[in-house]
Image (cartoon, rainbow, N blue to C red):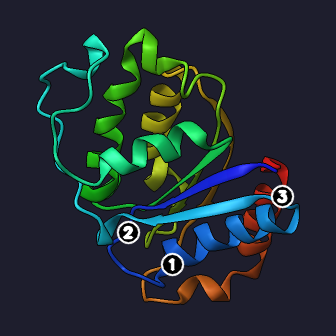
Amino acid sequence: MSKILAVVGSPRKDGNTHILVSKIAEGARQRGAGVDELLLGELKIKECDGCHRCWQGKECGKRDDMRHIYPKIGDSDAIIFGTPVYWYGPTGLMKMFLDRFVYFNCPENREKVRGKRAVIAVAFEEESIETAGLIVDMFEKSLAYLEMELAGKVLVPGVSDKGDILQKPERLEEAFELGQGLV
């Protein structure tokens, strides 16, 4: 059975990003995958301070929830990264989570993510798809650097108020199908 890690980088539980990530997860579950969902807003994740302990193959020196998340990342077959656009970038929650992927920079830990599939899900208020451009670039470069595969993305413009995304059934169907394709 495939294992999917669904990461919601929005502080709004049951908001547009959460709904979007859940729809991707639903598609994966329908194909038999097990899905573990992380709501970053409910976790304590500290910033990376560049100590490079992890580059030496040592455990991260931070005493926070990432210690429990690293094994989940390693055990997953695919990761869903969901974030709304905040000032043309990801939320601070998602950025701190991604910064801690430096853990996978050393040869001992790189094997835990190399070849893993990933999808990105981005919801945002503006109507122009270019609004998500910096986030897409950041993920494309970061995932390529980690030798992970960007298996797909779903970008949903024009959603602001909680639940607006429910008025975009074609995007939710796209998300569902993306989830099915992960398995």
The answer to the question of whether label 1 and label 2 lie on touching residues, with beta carbons closer than 8 A, is yes
Quarter of the view holding residue 111? top right
User: Badge 2 local density, few (<14 within 10 Å), some, or many (20+)?
Assistant: many
User: Badge 1 local density, few (<14 within 10 Å), some, or many (20+)?
Assistant: many
The residue tagged 1 is 16
Residue 52, how many percent across, how many down? 19, 19
Q: Nearer the viewer, residue 89 or 92?
A: 92
Quarter of the view holding residue 23? bottom right
Disc 1 from disc 3: Cα separation: 20 Å
Disc 2 element: loop
**First of labels 1, 3 by sequence position:** 1
Q: Nearer the viewer, residue 134 or 12?
A: 12
Residue 89 visible from this viewpoint: no
Residue 173, how many percent across, how many down? 80, 72
* Residue occupying image coordinates x 31% and y 72%: 42
What mark, if any, has residue 142 been given in the picture? none
The answer to the question of whether label 1 and label 3 lie on touching residues, with beta carbons closer than 8 A, is no
Q: Mark 1 or mark 3: which is in front?
A: 3
The residue tagged 3 is 180
Q: Is residue 94 left or right of residue 30?
A: left
The residue tagged 2 is 10
Disc 3 element: helix
